[in-house]
Image (spheres, helix red, strand yellow):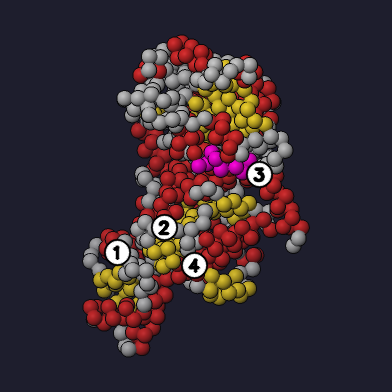
Amino acid sequence: MSYMDYVRTFKLPHSWCPGCGIGTIMQAIVRAFDALGWKNEDIAFITGIGCSGRMSTYINTNSMHTTHGRPLAFATGVKLARPDKHVVVVSGDGDALAIGGNHFIHAARRNIDIKLVIINNSVYGMTGGQVSPTTPQMFRTQTTPYGNIEPNFDVVKLAIAAGATFVARESVTRPRNLEKVIEKSFLHKGFSVVEAISNCHINLGRRNKLKDQITMLRWINDRIIPMNVAKRKSPEEIKDKIILGVFHEDKEREEYTQLYEKLVETVRGSK
Amino acid sequence: MKRVVMPGNETVAHAAVAAGCRFYAGYPITPSSELAAEMSKLLPKVGGKFIQMEDEIASMAAAIGASVAGYKAMTATSGPGFSLKQEHIGLACMMEVPVVIVNVMRGGPSTGLPTHPAQGDVMQARWGTHGDHPIIALAPAFPTEIYMETIRAFNLAERFRNPVILLLDEILAHTYEVVDIPEPEEIELVDRKLPPSGLDRLDFYTYQRKEGDPPLLPNFFQGYNFHFESLAHDEMGFPTTDPEKVTHISRLREAKIEKHREEIWKNDEYMLEDAEIVIFAYGSVARSAKEAINRLRAEGIKVGLFRPVTLWPFPQQPLRKAVEERKVLVTEMNSGQMVYEVERALRRDVFTLFKADGTPISPVEIMDKIKGELI
């Protein structure tokens, strides 16, 4: 087996822009599959709409390209139907946090064993670069031509507050770390969230003086800081930094489908 | 056979379980909530899965997800929730996933009249989701028929790999009535056909098929790494914008229903033979119509009923054949919806009696209309 066995090579070349971070994230995901030795046919890979949504076309497992913002709702049906299988969802920042925000917080609250990777490129890329819930303040987008006045979500805090039991953040500028943290999240039993910081130089960068991938990746790289390093800094020093690492891991809380199975046993036992 | 007294909402739940439904996802909404409540009681007992999702959209999605994973799945709702589910009904049409949607119709538009009956969603059942798509919608009118049509809804969904909409209204959903429940061995059940397991390649078990056939798609985890796609896709399930391929697969989706209309159509004709006037009515209104017919006949006025149980695909030919040149009265609990199909089928104007104020159409209203305008 090689990680390429999880890729529908006959569907390549892919449709993403040159230099997009999504390829790095996709490779991290299939490398994690390979490292864990998961069988293709035991994985359901579900995506929503947007650049991230296209990934299900290229992943060689059971796959489903669904509607905008709702992949977690479909995944909930799949996982509840087949708790014995691996259910992985890839979603963008607009998909998961704007139109799909409700499904995100409720999947986290239930702690259903779905592995979510959020590709956060801070913009609606596929539709031409509109402001998203994670666009930095004062950034220019197609729909904020004078600058974005809205504050952005902190995905990690949101996920923890909603009840996710594994929450991490990584960056496409650290592909090996990204792969390792995704692998770790896949091993977690419960709702896991990995926020992967990515670049959209085409539809976000070019409006904000970051118009090629190198410039934009450098900009990301200058802002990230690993959690262990951040711990040694003063709050002032890390004010504008994106902290990377595993923020939350709760192995105690029971997973939803297991609780459901127990309920069924109790109900059937008491007949 | 077993005789039970229960309201329509519960009848649907019991019939669904008898039909093999083992997954329900829903969201509370009047007047369909008791259906979800009954499913939450029944499903764990038979090892099935019940989940109350965070909204209507999610419950439609979860039902589709479970169906893709091999379960017979259902969701239920009413007007506003039915509107919210439309995008995913279209997705199930596009991906050709079997699923049953119950819509207990209430007064609309918007929040409307939550605790009152209506038939204002019959066109939404046909055209509610965007884009061209095939659909099946059933509208039972009697308690035992609700039971049997629920089973038929699952059978049709599985047979044609398409969403099937079961339309009730607040009266049918809430009225406690006597239901004759057949023994399990008397019920014919249909399960979706799957490709054989263990093939090297799936080439001939995808969206490829003879025109008129439903596709033979694998379930998730059956051993094939099959892709379900919401974009326009080719016969292998992968996205395409090729106009020829788009037209071809869209034609295949339509044809699987169109070519089996006779199998899907179901109508009830009552005292039609010697009737001079034909009432066209469906759902609970048809029951008022039957009563009106009995009373009018006692007065010597010859009236009959054509009652479609299958609303979509619309029974054009059976209606034409049954009605011939006779006078027709279309009566429905809305401001006139199915009447467009009736007039299109008959290619002439008909008499109408519509009401959309939250109250049922009574036998007396139908009698007055006929006495006042049709004779």
Q: Which residues are magenta?
A: A102-112
**Chain label for disc 2:** B
Calculate the distance from the C-alpha at mark 4 to the C-alpha at mark 1.
22 Å
Precedes in sequence: disc 4 or disc 1: 4
**Chain label for disc 1:** B
Q: Is residue A109 magenta?
A: yes
Which residue has dot 2 on it?
B79
Precedes in sequence: disc 4 or disc 2: 2
* Amino acid bearing label 1: Gly
Calculate the distance from the C-alpha at mark 3 to the C-alpha at mark 2.
30 Å
Which residue has dot 4 on it?
B173
Image quarter (top left, top right, bottom left or bottom right) of the C terminus of chain A: bottom right
Asked which secondary structure carries label 3, the reply is helix
Asked which secondary structure carries label 4, the reply is helix
At 63% from the left edge and 27% from the top edge, which residue is drawn?
Answer: A247
In the rendering, which numbered label is found on residue A256? 3
Check if mark 4's residue and mark 2's residue have beta carbons within 8 Å.
no
Calculate the distance from the C-alpha at mark 4 to the C-alpha at mark 3.
32 Å
Q: Nearer the viewer, residue A188 or A68?
A: A188
**Chain label for disc 4:** B
Position above or below: A104 against A23: below
Query: At which x and y percent is residue A227?
Result: 62, 20
